[in-house]
Amino acid sequence: MNPNKAFLNSFVNVSEETFAELEAITNYIKVPAGTELVGLGDVPSKIYLLVSGVVRCYLTTESGKEFNKSFYLPTCFFASLTALIKKSPSIFVFETITDCKIYEIDYYKFRGLCKSHESINTLYSKVLEEVYMKYENRLVELISLDAKDRYFALLEQTPNIDELIPQYHIASYLGITPVQLSRIRKKIEDN
């Protein structure tokens, strides 16, 4: 079986015909590190499925300071969803941290398939559920955990995160400075 179809079937069974229609609105792209997939103020039209590499989503303040909202690792779907739904400029930037292989899917054609194929609509619902659960978990971490425990939670989710992502990006994601992250890591090493 086609590995892409097998992946989709892990969410919902998709017929060969429906899979072919989905393939027709999907492009496989190789993207170098440091590429903005969605820039600040862009009105996006794509959703993405990360095959390999690491992507970050960040917000930039008026003073130019960046805050990492999310990191995406292989087999994650990502998009500037509010901007897609509202057809408005994105307040987030999505940037590749490493070289990446990505499927980009035309969001509006995908939504059209949702209307004509129950299996695609179910896939969309399941992906949104996964995205929302991750978002909710992230909010709980930010509200209830201190920086050290947020770092431990990140390590639990992605044990090799320190090898994949520069420390200053991890610090930004945790809401601390790189110096504070260094202190946390040193305390962990000393124990």
Image (spheres, helix red, strand yellow):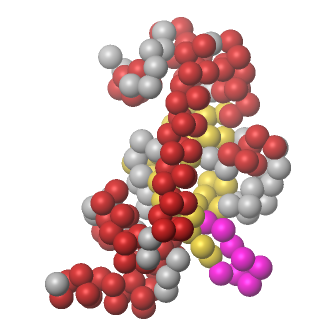
Residue 33: percent from left, percent from top: 49, 62
The part of the image, by quadrant, that contains residue 156 is: bottom left
Determine if the magenta segment contains residue 146.
no
Look at the magenta stretch and give its main secondary structure: loop
Residue drawn where x is 62% and y is 13% of the image = 117
Instruction: Please say if 123 is above or below 153.
Output: above
Residue 53: percent from left, percent from top: 41, 54
**Is any part of residue 76 visible from this angle?**
yes
The N terminus is located in which quarter? top left
Residue 113: percent from left, percent from top: 66, 19
Residue drawn where x is 81% and y is 43% of the image = 86
- Please identify the residue farthest to the left as the structure is shown: 191
Residue 162: percent from left, percent from top: 32, 71
- Please identify the residue farthest to the front as the structure is shown: 144
Instruction: Please say if 78 is above or below 4.
Output: below
**Is any part of residue 95 visible from this angle?**
no
Q: As rendered, which of 142 and 38 lies closer to the eye?
A: 142
Number of numbered discs on residues:
0
The part of the image, by quadrant, that contains residue 75 is: top left
- Left or right of 162 on screen, residue 48: right
- Left or right of 168 on screen, residue 156: left
The part of the image, by quadrant, that contains residue 90 is: bottom right
Instruction: Please say if 70 is above or below 190.
Output: above
Determine if the magenta segment contains residue 62.
yes
Q: As rendered, which of 45 and 128 lies closer to the eye?
A: 128
Query: Residues in magenta?
Result: 58-65
Residue drawn where x is 43% and y is 77% of the image = 147
Residue drawn where x is 60% and y is 73% of the image = 67
The C terminus is located in which quarter? bottom left
